[in-house]
Amino acid sequence: MANIKSAKKRILVINKKTEANKSRKSEIKTYIKKFEAALAEGNLEQAKEYLTICEKKLYQAAAKNTVHKKAASRKVSRMTIKLNNKVA
């Protein structure tokens, strides 16, 4: 455990940020799973809705450095390709 006051404060801040990041990542994973399930069922309209939600959430997470910017783009790109392959 830290002895210095500023180090103790940083520990508290880090814990808060860790919780926020976990929450964001978990929410994104949930929407990705819902997208995959909608695709598997063949429900393309629902899949499109989930894709837009996932895209928004991923880019927001990237803006807050929860997820790397290029990782977010890659995930969105791959999900879009999956959706387009099902439509075509």
Image: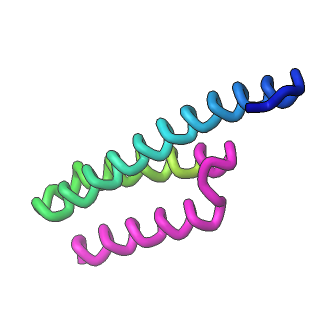
Number of marks in the rendered image: 0
How far across and how far down the image is residue 9, in percent? 79, 24
Query: What is the span of residues highlighted in magenta in the rendered image?
Result: 60-88
Instruction: Please name the residue shown 19% across and 56% down the image.
Output: 37
- Between 46 and 33, the residue placed more toward the observer is 33
Q: Where residue 87 appears, x then y in whole percent?
A: 24, 71
Q: Quadrant of the N terminus?
A: top right
Relative depth, front residue between 14 and 86 = 14
Q: Name the quadrant of the C terminus.
A: bottom left
The relative height of residue 72 versus residue 60 in the rendered view (above or below) is: below
The percent coordinates of residue 62 (x first, y second) are 63, 51
Residue at image coords 79%, 31%: 2
Identify the main secondary structure in magenta. Answer: helix
- Where on the picture, by quarter, is residue 20? top right
Residue 40 lies in the magenta stretch:
no
Is 33 displayed left or right of 25 in the figure?
Answer: left
Q: Residue at x 15, y 56 (%)?
A: 43
